[in-house]
Image: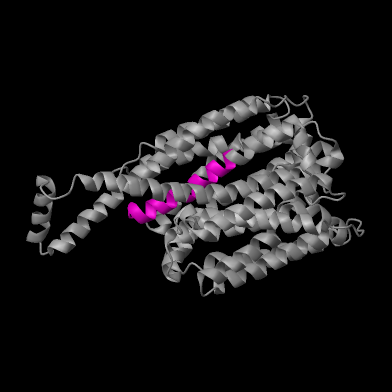
């Protein structure tokens, strides 16, 4: 339910934007607001668990998620929808790490790897179900129902969890919380994300608002680092970055996830705005991403302690680069089958992406530091995903403007082909203005398609560059990786 909500809205963005009277680019705030709030709340999971108990916290998190989903469906404006998505992301933070905690507490240690592999398969169902379900609901009912469907599922999940675990609550005790660190975290992450989201709309650094947000992000980040390195009970343990594997592993995982998620959001926007796809058809074009991932993840979970995770992650990055290179060849004439094929291949890259990189990131850490390390790596990854979405859509729009200018330069007065096209459209009953508007739409379609190709090609190149980061890590000891993968998602 949690992972589904990070992907189900992707194919519904044009419908949400149209219904609420905003541009599709502004509609992406529905995705990024959830991601940022989710990222900020993840590092608090450890403190909240010790304060309230894992079972109570998990059950409350699920119930609050249900409430936030209901509010999202009722939102009458983009501002309120974003506010409720922030609430939804914030209460969702503890759900994924605590689901792993409760699962591992239910199995003997020798079955932990199998349990986590099965857990991983359930999280990979969402990339398949999300676009399909979101597209079908948007086309056949209404977009608010992509949030309402969480209500029965969440209530059932909370009831079952409480029924099984209520007698197995974890010990609780009061701990101080780093309020200053948390405030600084919210300040710099929020300012940076708002700057990225509104930058294109406000003409970047020509706007006082963007300059102020940039200063808040930079100063807030600098003060946050100093404070967290000196605080007695830091909200985020930045000392973990002193470890080579954690530093390079978390960096590779986060940047790669930002690239991956930015492209995941861009694809349905391009398909629906410029290729004439309905939300359902866009969902079908994106759904196969989970098939190979679901088939291969149990194998990866089993073999990650035997094979070199660095080689596995390298294979994943090469796979992502190949998929994105294939997509960079798309034209306005590309058919559904050719759009589907790279998506299917991407599932194999996903299977070899999360578990090996998380294994590398968490290897060599003392057991008592793994929960904090898993929380921090998740925070960095989810934040990178939200920022990747903003950057991808901004670059797409900027490159489209550039391509439109270049294409339009050849269609001015005196161009025989343009004049012939206008004459042909006028012969069909169009006025001169309508004829030029129709040509402009075709130019826009070409410009945005070329711009999407630019983003895909640039992302492919960056994936290849990221391979170098993987090889700065040390290979984990054989047999240790399976246990370390506990913080995988």
Residue 424 belongs to the span the image colors magenta? no
Of residue 425 and residue 208, the one placed in the foreground of this image is 208
Residue 107 in sight? yes
Residue 258 belongs to the span the image colors magenta? yes
Of residue 440 and residue 20, the one placed in the foreground of this image is 440
At horizontal 62% and vertical 24% (from top left) the residue drawn is 311
Give the magenta part as a residue range. Answer: 256-276
Q: How far from the left and from the top, in percent, is residue 489?
A: 68, 45
65 up-or-down from 270: above or below: below
At horizontal 56% and vertical 71% (from top left) the residue drawn is 80
At horizontal 87% and vertical 49% (from top left) the residue drawn is 232
State which quarter of the image contains the N terminus. Answer: bottom right
Q: How far from the left and from the top, in percent, is residue 120?
A: 66, 44
Instruction: Examine the residues drawn in magenta and state their main secondary structure.
Output: helix
Q: How far from the left and from the top, in percent, is residue 193?
A: 58, 54
Q: What colouring method underlies this structural image?
A: one colour
Residue 75 occupies which quadrant of the picture? bottom right
Q: Is residue 246 left or right of residue 252?
A: right
Q: Is residue 141 left or right of residue 70?
A: left
Residue 399 occupies which quadrant of the picture? top left
């Amino acid at each position: 339910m949690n992972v589904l909500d990070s992907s189900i809205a992707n194919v519904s963005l044009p419908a949400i934007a149209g219904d609420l009277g905003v541009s599709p680019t502004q509609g992406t705030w529905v995705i990024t607001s959830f991601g940022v709030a989710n990222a900020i709340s993840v590092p608090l999971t450890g403190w909240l668990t010790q304060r309230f108990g894992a079972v109570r916290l998990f059950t409350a998190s699920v119930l609050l998620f249900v409430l936030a989903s209901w509010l999202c469906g009722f939102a009458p404006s983009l501002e309120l929808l974003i506010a409720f998505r922030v609430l939804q992301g914030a209460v969702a933070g503890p759900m994924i790490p605590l689901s792993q905690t409760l699962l591992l507490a239910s199995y003997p240690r020798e079955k932990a790897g199998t349990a986590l592999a099965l857990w991983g398969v359930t999280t990979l169902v969402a990339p398949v179900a999300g676009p399909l379900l979101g597209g079908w609901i948007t086309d056949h009912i209404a977009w608010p129902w992509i949030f309402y469907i969480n209500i029965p599922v969440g209530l059932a999940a909370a009831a079952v969890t409480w029924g099984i675990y209520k007698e197995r609550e974890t010990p609780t005790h009061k701990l101080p919380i780093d309020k200053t660190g948390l405030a600084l975290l919210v300040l710099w992450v929020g300012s940076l994300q708002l700057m990225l989201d509104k930058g294109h709309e406000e003409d970047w650094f020509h706007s006082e608002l963007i300059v102020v947000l940039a200063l808040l992000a930079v100063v807030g980040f600098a003060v946050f680092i100093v404070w967290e390195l000196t605080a007695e009970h830091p909200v985020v343990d930045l000392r973990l970055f002193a470890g080579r594997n954690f530093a390079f592993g978390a960096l590779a995982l986060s940047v790669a996830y930002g690239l991956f998620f930015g492209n995941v959001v861009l694809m349905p926007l391009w398909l629906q705005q410029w290729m004439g796809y309905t939300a359902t058809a866009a969902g079908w074009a994106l759904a196969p991403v989970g098939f190979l991932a679901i088939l291969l993840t149990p194998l990866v979970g089993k073999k990650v302690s035997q094979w070199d995770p660095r080689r596995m992650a390298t294979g994943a990055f090469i796979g992502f680069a190949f998929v994105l290179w294939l997509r960079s060849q798309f034209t306005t004439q590309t058919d559904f089958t050719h759009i589907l094929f790279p998506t299917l291949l991407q599932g194999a890259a996903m299977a070899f992406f999360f578990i090996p990189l998380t294994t590398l990131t968490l290897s060599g850490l003392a057991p008592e530091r793994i929960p904090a390390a898993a929380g921090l790596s998740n925070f960095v990854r989810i934040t990178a995903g939200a920022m990747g979405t903003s950057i991808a859509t901004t670059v797409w729009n900027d490159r489209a403007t550039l391509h439109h200018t270049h294409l339009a330069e050849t269609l001015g007065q005196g161009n025989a082909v343009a004049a012939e096209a206008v004459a042909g459209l006028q012969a069909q009953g169009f006025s001169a203005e309508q004829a030029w508007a129709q040509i402009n739409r075709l130019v826009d379609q070409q410009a945005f398609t070329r711009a999407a190709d630019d983003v895909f090609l640039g992302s492919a190149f960056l994936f290849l560059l990221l391979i170098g980061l993987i090889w700065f890590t040390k290979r984990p000891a054989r047999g240790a990786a399976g246990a370390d993968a506990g913080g995988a998602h």
